[in-house]
């Protein structure tokens, strides 16, 4: 057998080395180049698309404000069709939006409010998400408010969920 790139004899069916394989394969299917696209938000500005980013930063911030106004009823309507998003439910969506809303908070306060552990923290709801599911008018702003969210390590999160830790025992964080 001969290498498709350098024509040397090889035991392999196509290439003599990874380098030769890379040369041929990169010619057949070159890398995507960055291209100028229009922002899919309302502003209409142009930005460079990398890794599927289609919104400019101001539109992303505006979208975050839109997330705050989503209600539990809106999420329930989305899941009426069982074929859409299999495996997810209303509670999972609320937790997803919580992560989106408090993404910057988690970066600024990257430690457990109870013990100060900083390797892994979780966003915890003081009032459980399941309490809000029956109220279709509850908004993400209400469910995921700073007063209802604690940053805890996995151990203290488990203790809070299982009634071993009271939320009043957790010192408040400075949300400024």
Image (spheres, helix red, strand yellow):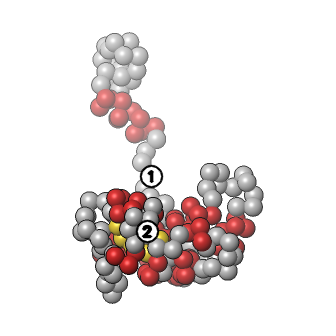
Picture quadrant where residue 42 is located: bottom right
Q: CA–CA distance between discs 2 and 1?
A: 40 Å
Camera-side residue of 38 and 56: 56
Secondary structure under badge 2? strand
Q: Residues within 10 Å of mark 1 (few under 14, many from 20)?
A: few
The answer to whether residue 46 is seen in the rendering is no
What residue is rendered at 33% in x and 75% in y? 170
Mark number displayed over residue 46: none
- Residue 66 appears left or right of 77: left
Q: State the quadrant of the N terminus.
A: top left
Look at the picture and state if 14 lies above or below 154: above
Task: Tell me the quarter of the picture where residue 88 sits.
Answer: bottom right
Furthest toward the right, the residue is 81
Q: Quadrant of the C terminus?
A: bottom left
* Residue 85 visible, this orientation: yes
- Sooner in the amino-acid sequence: mark 2 or mark 1: 1
Expressed as whole percent of the image width and height from the top left, the position of residue 159 reads 39, 62
Residue closer to the observer: 28 or 39? 39
Q: Which residue lies under the disc numbered 1?
A: 32
Q: Residues within 10 Å of mark 2 (few under 14, many from 20)?
A: many
Question: Is the residue 7 above or below the residue 31 in the image?
Answer: above
Place of residue 133 in the rendered image (x, y in percent of width and height, measured from the top left): 64, 70
Label 1 secondary element: loop
Residue at 62% across, 51% down:
87
The residue located at (52%, 66%) in the rendering is 95
For label 2, the residue is 124
Please identify the residue farthest to the front as the structure is shown: 164
Q: Nearer the viewer, mark 2 or mark 1?
A: 2
* Residue 94 drawn at (x, y percent): 56, 68
Mark 2 touching mark 1, by CB under 8 A?
no
- Residue name at image x 35 percent, y 84 percent: 175
């Amino acid at each position: 057998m001969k290498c498709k790139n350098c024509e040397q004899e090889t035991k392999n069916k196509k290439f003599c080395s990874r380098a030769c394989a890379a040369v041929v394969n990169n010619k057949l299917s070159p890398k995507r180049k960055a291209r100028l696209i229009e922002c899919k938000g309302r502003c209409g500005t142009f930005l460079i698309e990398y890794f599927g980013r289609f919104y400019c930063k101001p539109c992303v911030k505006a979208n975050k404000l839109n997330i705050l106004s989503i209600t539990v009823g809106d999420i329930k309507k989305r899941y009426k069709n069982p074929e859409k998003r299999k495996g997810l439910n209303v509670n999972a969506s609320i937790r997803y939006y919580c992560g989106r809303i408090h993404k910057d908070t988690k970066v600024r306060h990257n430690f457990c409010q109870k013990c100060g552990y900083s390797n892994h923290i979780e966003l915890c709801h003081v009032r459980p998400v399941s309490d809000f599911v029956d109220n279709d008018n509850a908004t993400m702003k209400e469910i995921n408010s700073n007063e209802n969210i604690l940053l805890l390590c996995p151990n203290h999160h488990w203790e809070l969920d299982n009634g071993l830790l009271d939320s009043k025992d957790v010192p408040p964080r400075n949300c400024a």
